[in-house]
Image: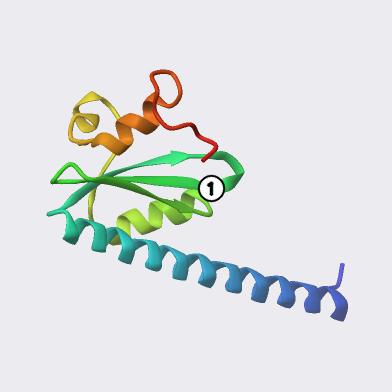
Amino acid sequence: MAETAADAADTGQTSRTDARKAARAERRAARLAHQIGAFAKEHGGAEGQLAYIGQAGARIVLVGEDGAWGDLVAPTYAVAENAAAKSGITMHEEFDGEFALKVRTGPYEWSRMAGMQIGGPSNDR
């Protein structure tokens, strides 16, 4: 069948929409990579791990060489992978024992993890 003018217009519109989405994802990955780099610089280097968190996207968990940790959330797993690749840090497949041992927690984290079970602050404050 011959392509109609309407079909061609729809294809052109779809292409532009896809290009905008791809550009937006690339900008988001670049911003996340910059944030990852800043974290690594502040903490003497960093390693990371990606975790899919459903419709919310993916979490990039970061652990600094000094044991500090943090995380960033990307809108999609693909954006998170792109950001991690752009940042150049070492990425782990899993948050396994060896990687987890690098994390240093302080009193705040311990009180939050304990929650109301052993008298820590409640989660509703």
Q: Which residue is mark 1?
A: 57
Q: Quadrant of residue 17?
A: bottom right
Of residues 89 and 107, the one nearer the viewer is 107
Q: Quadrant of residue 87?
A: bottom left
Q: Is residue 54 left or right of residue 112?
A: right
Q: Quadrant of residue 48?
A: top left
Task: Identify the residue at image location x=25%, y=58%.
Answer: 39
Q: Is residue 69 left or right of residue 15?
A: left
Task: Identify the residue at image location x=46%, y=66%.
Answer: 28
Res 93 visible: no
Q: Is residue 119 above or below residue 71?
A: above
Identify the element where label 1 is drawn: loop
Across and down, in percent, residue 20 comes to 59, 74
Outermost residue on the top side: it is: 117
Q: Is residue 10 above or below residue 87?
A: below
Task: Identify the residue at image location x=87%, y=67%.
Answer: 1
Q: Is residue 13 left or right of residue 57?
A: right
Across and down, in percent, residue 123 comes to 50, 34
Across and down, in percent, residue 18 comes to 63, 68
Across and down, in percent, residue 121 comes to 43, 32
Type of residue at label 1?
Gly
Task: Identify the residue at image location x=79%, y=77%.
Answer: 8
Q: Is residue 89 above or below residue 25?
A: above
Of residues 102 and 48, the one nearer the viewer is 102
Mark 1 residue crowding within 10 angstroms, few (<14) / some (14–19) / many (20+): some
Res 99 visible: yes
